[in-house]
Image (cartoon, helix red, strand yellow):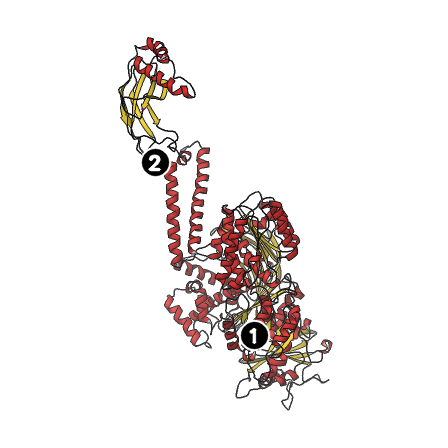
Amino acid sequence: MSAPSSSSPPVDKDKLERVLATDCGSTTTKAILIEKVGGEWRQTWRGEAPTTVEAPFEDVTRGVLNGAQEVAELSGRSLVRDDGAGILRTNGDPTKGVSAYISTSSAGGGLQLVVGGVVLSMTAESAMRAALGAGAIVMDTFAANDRRKPFEQIERIRQLRPDMILLAGGIDGGTRKHVVALAEMLKAARPRTRLGGGFDLPIIYAGNQRVTDDIERILGEMCDLKVVPNVRPVMESENLGPARDKIHDLFMEHVMAQAPGYDKLMRWVDAPIMPTPGAVGLIMQTIARQRGINVLGVDIGGATTDVFSVFDGTFNRTVSANLGMSYSVSNVLAEAGLSNILRWVPFDIDEKGLRNRIGNKMIRPTTIPQTLEELKIEQAIAREALRLAFIQHKEFATDLKGVQQERTIADAFRQTGQDSLVKMQALDLIVGSGGVLSHAPRRVQSMRMMMDAYEPEWITEVAVDSIFMMPHLGVLSSIHEEAATEVFEKDCLIFLGTAIAATGEQKPTGPALRVQFRLPDGTGVDESIDSGRLRRWELSRDDEIEITLTPLQRRLDVGEGPGKARTAKVRGGVVGLVVDTRGRPIHLPDAAAERVRKLQEWVEALGEYGAGGQSRWAGQGAD
Amino acid sequence: MNLLILFAALLAPVLAATPATGLSVETPAYSDGLTLSLSWTAPDDAHSLILLRSDQGEAGPWHVAAGPWPGTKAEHQDKVTTDPTKTPPAAHYWYRLVSLDEDTAPPPEADGDDAAAAEQAYVAALLAGQPATAAVQGTPVASWLSASPGYLLLLALIVSVGGLMLWFTDRARKGHEMFIRRMPGIDAIEEGIGRATEMGKPVLYVPGIDELQDIQTIASMLILGQISRKVAEYQSDIVVSCCIPIVREVADEVVGSGYMLAGYPDAYNPKNVRFISSEQFAFTAGTNGIILREKPATHIFLGRFFAESLILAETGYVNRSVQIAGTAEATQLPFFVAACDYTLIGEELFAVSAYLSKDPRLVSSLKASDYVKVFVVVMLVVGTIAASFGSSFFIELFTISG
């Protein structure tokens, strides 16, 4: 995703010394100060204040100023203009103000789009990818094959009231009748905007370019029609950039301009305001590109779970709208099933009790666990929410459909279809964020949750976003990529450690993996780990060790082929090095007593809840 | 009369032999209704025995039913007719057993009109000059069951398939999900239709080049029904290229029904279902013409193909179309695998209809036949191992006789 076009004058990144970044969320506006300290970029101060989009204030800048003021007080530096009319700039005085102010926003529900295309799995999916990549929430997707009659589609569009509509369909020179039919359906629906009735709904047309005249004739008068290059000019490739950029532009011009106080905020910022998820996606892509790695990111919230991935440079984002830890927690139960949640609870609990606890969480979404049992249940639910969102992401993140394949003779006997782009064995880094991961009482609990949900294979680093700083860094990367990367690595991420797991058919008992390495203090480790175990060693992020992994079962693979040893350099984190011999997929005993015993064994192996199962609630620090 | 005198003279010296005793005729157990079991006590002095049979009564006329055998033989299974469609079995049969000594001449081997007369002369001479048992009556009766293990196994398999089908159908109707493994080739059909829709081009369907009664063509027609319905739902077009006139007529009905079931009967264009030529390569050239002129986005070749398979698939490849092929014709599979995006191999072709429609009856039939196939494969493996170790149990189990 390219950076959106901006009406602000370009920022000279060489003159940047101090940047204030805010993220205007639905409830909280988070402000951080990023400064050059001793030649390196660091996040130094952080403040937050309630978002003030809604009545009685109805001015988002009030919350921004409050957040900035908190940062100013903590840092002892003036950041807000005396007249309260904006963020103070340095203007040659290094003791006050900032070099640049940037912001993201998801207030008021973020950017909400309806997308349309001819075939759900082809141009409609390309349009959805463009919208999701731009940080939007896709409210609904229309297509010729969505199994709805035109009157049902029209009724639905009338109900939705999106911020804008992205219409694609047909390759260049492809179908005309389907695209025209979609446009006529939109014309009949006469969709209205969410925020205000005073302007026409923006519709971005990114379909068959030879039908542009027809589209302009049909839709030109009823909406603010913008024509951009086709998101799918040929079947074999996508061109999502222009549509994404146009979404950003319209987000600024139409959506933000209508939201209370955003007209002022838009004048204050030095780079275009980005939708929060779009900024997160941008920093993910930046990191993946700069480090040459594959990244998987997740943001698990109360109502939705966002999953981001960058594999071999291809970025994908999905929003699982009904998987979350509070408002959507009952939906997690419905989708995963009680038995799937129950399998992660490391103590005996009856089904009715578990149902009641989940129901209570849904009707009191802002409560947090008060007992250790509640915490364990919440983390069991989180595992399933993460797992289900990840499954949806893997299904979405595939190669383009409808493309001529070049399959070999061997492929003729394969029973799998199109592979997902998300390949766990090629994954280098998992980044988790969201309350249940970022604010887990012990970091090792976050690591276990992600290891259980994602089942990383071979060697994978695991990290969490310390204070959900990724949106700020995403928008920072649009003006200073290196600074954003530096802060991301040093302050944003808390590296939990490295997870190591073998793949392949595994015997349930007996030795599975031999691990040999030398700890930084010189102690040698040479250990054979049985199947079904978790083993943890303390190892800090600063220490890099060379580890040799030798499969002790001939079908196990650690990256060099079945049964072959592998030597690799790994680094730790606040949790350290975790070797997982539970198999892929993770096998849990069917019998309840045996399952609980196994879960408790894993809990103790990692020291998840401290001695005697007591949780250390004191803050988010490292173990 | 001359022949009778001649045979009587030849047989005169053998009058010393004694007749067999205890001749009895029974209907064998699990009989096919064409066989009677005879048993007797062989005489000590007979060199050989010959069996006479009459279907008129104990007075004859008699015909040589079997023999001559060595004099020690004591039982025989007599097949009363070799071709029951031409010579149906009689209600009753009578038998006599004649004892012969070593000088007795064998039955005459005359052909044509003389054969019957020669046999009658020979039999009359035997009865006149040789010791024979009294006539014994037997009645051939067909049994309901055959004792042959092969038949019983066949019966068990048929009953099992029927039972499994009913069971699976019942489960499917009660909402149990039936697992059918993924077949990327079939999944790709809908993708191919989507591609054609996006590109504004038709889908090309070729149902093979064999007659309608060929099982592969029948399967192809069933699949065509599903595909045309899907094409209609996408409001796209399908071109069907046929080699056999009657196949074209059936395809016309099938595609029309598909559009009607999808709710778009007016969108169906009968001109898109085309008869090209009954000549194999004229058909191939015509279909290639469609590929190159109309540039369909997706080609689906399902049915029985021969030498034209590679020509069609190669042309499609050059056209950059997505191609899905399927045939049970083993010799053509390599060409399809080499040139097409997806290939349905052998029996996968017959599973497509169930896979696409998810109809409980079709799916349950597929599941039942799969289970029988698994059973047969297991039997083959076990039988091979058993035979390798000298056991004939499995060979006998699969032998159909009697």
The kind of secondary structure the magenta stretch mainly shows is: loop
State which quarter of the image contains the N terminus of chain A: bottom right
User: Where, by quadrant of the figure, is residue A258 drawn?
Assistant: bottom right
Three-letter amino acid code at the position of disc 1: Leu
Label for residue B146?
A: 2
Q: Which residues are magenta?
A: B54-59
Number of marks present in the image shown: 2
Residue in the image at 40% along x and 56% along y: B172
**Could you tell me if residue A486 is visible in this image?**
no
**Percent position (x, y) of residue A508?**
47, 52
Write down the chain letter for disc 1.
A
Answer above or below: position of A534 versus A280: above
Q: Nearer the viewer, residue A418 or B59?
A: B59
Q: Secondary structure at mark 1?
A: helix
Q: Residues within 10 Å of mark 1 (few under 14, many from 20)?
A: many
Chain ID of residue with mark 2 = B
Instruction: Say whether residue A511 is magenta.
Output: no
In the rendered image, residue B287, in percent from the top left (x then y), is placed at 62, 51
Residue labelled with disc 1: A186
